[in-house]
Amino acid sequence: MRAGARSDRVEPTRGVTRRGLIAGAAAAGTAAALWPARADAATATPSSADVVVVGAGFAGLTAAGLIQQAGRSVVVLEARNRVGGRVWNHDLGGGKVSERGGTFVGPTQDRVMALANQLGVGTFPTYDDGDAVYVNGSDRMTYSDTGPTGSAPPDPLILPELTAVVAELDQMSTSVPVDAPWTAQNAEEWDSETLKSWIDSNSVTPRFKEVVPIATRPIFGAEPRELSLLFTLFYIAASGDENNPGTFERNFDTRNGAQMSRFVGGSQVIATKIAKQLGSGVVLSSPVRQITQSSSGVTVVSDRATIGAKQVIVAIPPTLAGRIDYEPILPFQRDQLTQRFGQGTMTKVAAVYKAPFWRDAGLSGMAVTTGGPVTATFDDSPQGGTPGVIFGFVGGDLARQYNAMAPADRKSAVLNQFVTFFGTQASNAIDFFETSWSGEQWTRGCPVGIPSQGTLLAYGSQIRQPAGRVHWAGTETSTYWNGYMDGAVRSGERAAAEVLSEL
Amino acid sequence: MTVFEEDARGKISRRRLIAGAVAAGAAAAVPSSARADGAAQSSSVDVVVVGAGFAGLTAARKLRRAGHSVVVLEARERVGGRVWNHDLGGGTVTERGGTFAGPTQNRVLALARELRVGKFNTYDKGDNVYVADGARSTYSDTGITGTAPPDPQILGQLATVVAELDEMSKTVPVDAPWKAPNAAKWDGMTLESFLDSHNPTKRFTDLVAASTRPIFGAEPRELSLLFVLFYVAASGDEKHPGTFERNFDTRGGAQMWRFVGGSQKIALRMADQLGPRVLLGSPVRRIVQSRHGVTVHTDRATFGGKRAIVAVPPTLAGRIAYDPILPFDRDQLTQRYGQGTLTKVTAVYDRPFWRDAGLNGSALDLSGPVNFTYDDSPPDGKPGIVFGFVGGDRARAYNRSSQARRRAAVLDQFATYFGSRARKPRAFYETSWAGEQWTRGCPVGIPSTGTLVAYGPKLRNPVSRIHWAGTETSTFWNGYMDGAVRSGERAAAEVIARL
C-alpha cells in the first residue's frame, strides 16, 4: 500500500499488465470464478468472428442480419434467455399472443415495416372503430379520434390551449436537426429547461398542466419535470422520416400515427425470425461483462463465451452499455453521457377477456385519463378479436406508486379504472398480467433512455460516435423514431453499415 | 487464510505481488476459510467494505473498533478516492482532489485530530482577483460579499439571489429534501430556469456559472433547483443551518483550512491502521446476497461477509452486478446520478510570488478555462502553488484542446491574475476527474431533475444486507470530505446495529 507516493501516473503500463492477465485467464478462469458456471456452455459458438454484436434486441439482430448477408461472420451475445429486448410476446395459449413491450407500428416507420415485409411478417390495423374514452376527475366523455385533436382528448375546457401548445411544439421541433439536436439554434436555451418549466411559463389553465402527463407517461415513462425541453422537441422531430418532418400528432395518434398497426403473431416474431436465420450465431443467457480493445481487434468476454473480433456493436440501452467494463476505458465524454441517460419508468398492465366486449358498446378500447394508475389504454386483442385484450400504460410517478402497491391492490386498481372506461364487464378479466420494465435486469426501464438536462448539449454527439472498434446501436441512437422499434432497426442498419465499411 | 491463487501462466504483475503480500499479511488476522474452486482466494469477515475513499475507510475503522472483522476492497492501487496527494518531492505534497476543510465540517476535523493530522489556514492574506469582461480588479474577502466579488454591476442581484437561495434552503430538510413543501416544483426546474425568472444581467449569469463549475462541476442548466437548495442546506451542521456563504467562502467557510501533509494523509493513516485488511487493485464486480450473508466478488478473489457497505459514487455502485438485482427504484436512482465534470489544474513556482504583491492567490474569472484559483502552497510557502478549477462546459471544452494549448490557456489566465511570472512555472499538471476510471467525475454526483423527488430515499435505504455510503449519501457537507466521513460513520452504525 503506497498510496499517494506516485508523482506521475503509470496507468498505461499497469493497464497492459492487467489486460494481459485478463486476456490470458478470463475465459477459462476469471469469468468462470466470478460468474455462475454454465454447464451448457455453448460448444458450437466460435471463438472468433468478424463482428460481435452485444444485445439481441431489434437493433442488434438487424445489424447482425445485415452483417451476415454481407458475407461476414457475426456472433450475437444476449444476456436474456430470449431475443427481442424490449419487444416480448406473451403467450395467451391456443396460438394467440399479446405484447408485453413494443407493440405498434405506424406511417414513416419505414425500416421496421420493410424488415417485417422482408421476413414475411404481416401487419393488421390496431382496432380503432368507435370512440375513445377520456376521464378527468369525475368527468367521463367519449370522443372520436377522427376529430381535429386525433388521439388527444378534445376536452372543451382546454381545447384552445391544447391546439396552441401542440402547434407550438411542432413548430419549435422543426428547428431541431434529428441528427444533431444540440446544434439547434435554441439548443442551449431548450436544454436548460424542463418540459414542466416550459409548460408552466406557457400555460394559462391549471387543467391543461394536468393533461400534459397523459402524453409524457406513456411516451417517455416520465413526468414533465424529468424531461429536457430540447429532448422532447427532438423526440417530436424524430417522429417522422427523411421526407416527412416529425409531429406530435404522428407520435401520439393511432389513426395515421405510431399506434396505427400491429404485427401478425406479435411484434417479437420479427426478432425470432432474424434469430432463426442467425442460428448458432446467437448465444443466449450470456451477459457481456468486458470489452477489451487493442490495435488489432476486440475481445468480448461474456458469461458463456469469450470471442475475438475485428469490430463490436453494442446494441443495448446507454445506461447498460455504461456498465460494461471497457479496456482501455472509454473517453470520459462517452462515459458521462451514459451516466446521465436513465431509462424511463414504465409498467405495462394487461387484462384478458373472453371477448372484446367494449367494441359492442361502440368503444375502440382506447382510453386516456388524468387519473391513475393507468394513463392510457389500447385494444391489444389478437387479430380476429379473441380473446379480448386491453393493455394500459402506467408510467412516471404513477409507475413508482404502482410498484409500491400489493399485487392484489394493483390489479383491483387497474380493473376499477377499466370498469370506468368500458363498463362493469371489465371486472371479469380471465387473466391479468403486468410487466414492470424498470425491474427487467437487462433493460432497466422503458420505453426509452432519457438524457438529463444539459446532457444532449454537453455529450449528445457521443451517442453514435464509435470509440475505436466499439460501435453503438439501439433505439436511443436513432435519428428517426428514437425510442421505437423502427428506431432500433434504423440504428442496427446504420451500425452495420459503419462496421462493414471498416472490415 | 488459505490462499489459492490461480496460475497466471508465469505472468507476475505488480498487482499480483501486492495481492500476495497482502494475503500473507492477512493470514494472521483472518480465520482460515474453506477452499473455493481453486481459482480464487476466499475469506470471510463480518463486513465487506467496497471502496477505500474517506467513506469506506471511516466505516471500516469504526467497525473494527466495535470488534468486527472487515475487509476493504479498493479498485485503485491507492486509497483516498477523490482525495489524492501529489508528490512534489522533498517531502512536500499538494492535492489533486479534495483539499479544504472548514467550520461545521466537524466529522472530518475530528477524524483528522484523532489521527494526528494537523490543519493550517488556507493562505488568505491580501486581496482576491476578479476578472470580468476582460477587466481585472482586486477585492478583500473580508467585505460583505465574502469570497464572492463585490462587483457594483451585479451587487444588488447577487445579494438578492443569495439571500433568496439561503432562505429557500431553510425549508429543505437535509435528510429528506424530497419532503420540502415545494419539492416537486423545485425539482421540476433547473437552477438556470430559476435565475431566468429574475431577469439576470449577462454578467450575473456568468458569475453564477463561474460558481457552479467549481462547486458542482456543472452548468446551472444541469442542476435541479431542489438539489442546489439541498446542497446549500447541507453546508452546515446540526446546529448551524447551511448557507451559500459558508459553502463558497474561504474566510469562515468551506475553504478555510488545509491538512498538514495533504488531505490524503487522513486516508493513508486510516489505511495504515487497517493494515492488511485493505486490498488494493481489487475492483468489485459482483455482490451476491443470501439469507445468511453476502459474497463479494473481485476479479480474482471472493469475500464472504454478513453485510456489505458500498462506499463508491452512485453511478459506480450501479455498475456492480447484484444478485438478486436491486429494487428497480434504487437502480433507476443510480441511472440518473451522473458525476460532475471537473478538471483541477496546478502550476508550481519556486515561491508564492503573488503574496509579495498583496494577493492571496484566489481569483474568480468569468471567462475560462479556469474560473477559480486558490493558493495551494505547503504551510511554509515552499514551493508556491496555485491550482484552478475547470468545470462544466469549460472542462468539456478544455479536454478537447491539446495539452500545450491547455497549459498556455491556463498560464495566460494566471498571468492576468498574478503577473507575468505566472507564465513560467517549474511544473504544471492537471487531473481530469471525469477520466478517472474509479471516480468518473468530481466533485460530486448530481441527480437529474425529478430524481430526488422520485428516488431520493433510495440514496441511503439499505437493500437487505447492502448498505450505502459515500459523500453523496450524506445529509451534511454532501460532496465534501466531511460528508464522506459522516456517511461512513452512519453506515457503520447501521451495520453495527444489525450484527
Image (cartoon, coloured by chain):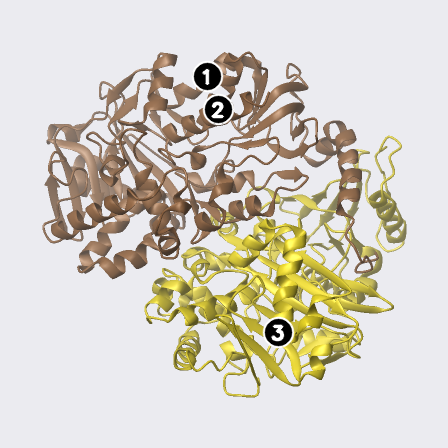
> Which type of secondary structure does the marked residue at label 2 adopt?
loop
Chain on which label 1 sits: A
Closer to the N terminus: mark 2 or mark 1? Answer: 2
Residue shown at 28%/42% (left/top)?
A174
Closest to the camera, between mark 2 and mark 1, is 1
Instruction: Residue lying at the far front in this picture: please name it.
Output: B420
State the hue of chain B.
yellow
Residue B142 lies in what quarter of the image? bottom right
Same chain assignment for discs 3 and 1: no
Q: Residue B259 or B307: which is nearer the viewer?
A: B259
Mark 2 touches mark 1? (CB < 8 Å): yes
**Does the rendering let one see residue A82?**
no
Q: Position of residue B246 (x, y in %)?
A: 55, 79
Residue shown at 48%/37% (left/top)?
A443
Q: Position of residue A384 (x, y in %)?
A: 22, 18
Q: Residue B7 or A174: which is nearer the viewer?
A: A174
Identify the residue position indicated by label 3 in the image.
B417
The chain that appears brown in the image is A
Same chain assignment for discs 2 and 1: yes
From this view, report whether residue B270 is shown above or below residue B252.
Answer: above
Instruction: Residue lying at the far bottom in this picture: please name it.
Output: B143
Tell me the kind of residue under disc 3.
Tyr
Identify the residue position indicated by label 2 in the image.
A83
Task: Point out which mark residue A274 bears.
Answer: 1
Tell me the kind of residue under disc 1.
Ile
* Distance of label 2 from label 3 (alpha carbons): 60 Å
Q: Is residue A330 left or right of residue A171?
A: right
Closest to the camera, between mark 2 and mark 3, is 3
> Which type of secondary structure does the marked residue at label 3 adopt?
helix
Residue B373 lies in what quarter of the image? bottom right
> Which type of secondary structure does the marked residue at label 1 adopt?
helix
